[in-house]
Image (cartoon, grey):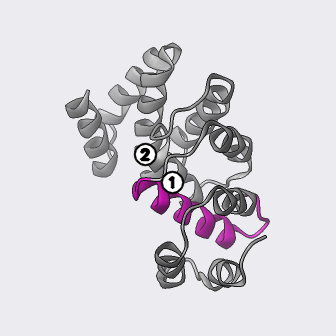
Amino acid sequence: MMSPSLLAALSEFDGRDTRPLESVRTSHEPTSELVATLLVHMGSDEERIQIAATWLLKAFVRDGLELDGDAVARLSKTLSELPDGHAALHICQVTGRPEIPEPAADAYGAFVRRGLESSATFVRAWATDALHHIALQHPRYADEASKAVARALADPAPSIRARARKIVEQA
């Protein structure tokens, strides 16, 4: 069951001020129950709640949370529900950090392909990064990832070119 403070924080998030989310980040352990609750809220009808849930998930992963295969598989089932925008960006920013099980790879692949076509520059930049990480785990995506990086290196948006250069530097 979701704690009232978590529900309040997700509801209080206005899309800009992350203080309610930071409060959750510092006061809650990222238990499997909390992760499951965040995954449920990623499917919310309210985009603001989706953004808040993905922001927290990203923060916990960046803090060292390792999502287990079950959580990654559940996450893969919510990807098609995420609108283009901040929620998609947050997931692209952590895609590939947990290992993506083979049965979930196609859902992640479809998700990042959608991100590559986004009108949001940062989503496109991070979708390129996410596809690269998917390809590292699932070689069948290597050619597609290589082409996406090449396109990104020639993109007119500086942020997309910068992310592509980081990928090349790290490869």
Q: Quadrant of residue 76?
A: top right
The residue lying toward the viewer, choosing from 136 and 15, is: 136
Q: Is residue 3 left or right of residue 90?
A: right
Spatial separation of the CA atoms under disc 2 and disc 1: 7 Å
Residue 8 position (above or below residue 74): below
Where is residue 21? Give x, y as percent: 53, 77
Q: Is residue 44 left or right of residue 59?
A: right
First along the sequence among labels 2 and 1: 1
Residue 96 position (above or below residue 58): above
- The residue drawn where x is 53% and y is 64% is 55
Is there any visible trace of residue 162 in the rendered image? Answer: yes
Where is residue 13? Give x, y as percent: 59, 81
- The residue drawn where x is 61% and y is 34% is 108
Residue extent of the magenta highlight: 43-64
Q: Magenta span: helix, strand or loop, mainly?
A: helix
Q: How many marks?
A: 2
Is there any visible trace of residue 119 in the rendered image? Answer: no
Q: Quadrant of the C terminus?
A: top left
Amino acid found under the numbered disc labelled 1: Leu
Q: Quadrant of the N terminus?
A: bottom right
Q: Quadrant of residue 101?
A: top right
Q: Label 2 neighbourhood size at 10 Å, few (<14), some (14-19), many (20+)?
A: many
Residue farthest to the left? Answer: 169
The residue lying toward the viewer, choosing from 146 and 75, is: 75
| Contact between labelled residues 1 and 2, with CB atoms less than 8 Å apart | yes
Q: Label 1 neighbourhood size at 10 Å, few (<14), some (14-19), many (20+)?
A: many
Tag of residue 89: 1
Q: Provide the secondary structure element on which disc 1 rests.
A: helix
- The residue drawn where x is 54% and y is 83% is 20
Residue pointed to by mark 2: 126
Amino acid found under the numbered disc labelled 2: Trp
- The residue drawn where x is 48% and y is 60% is 60
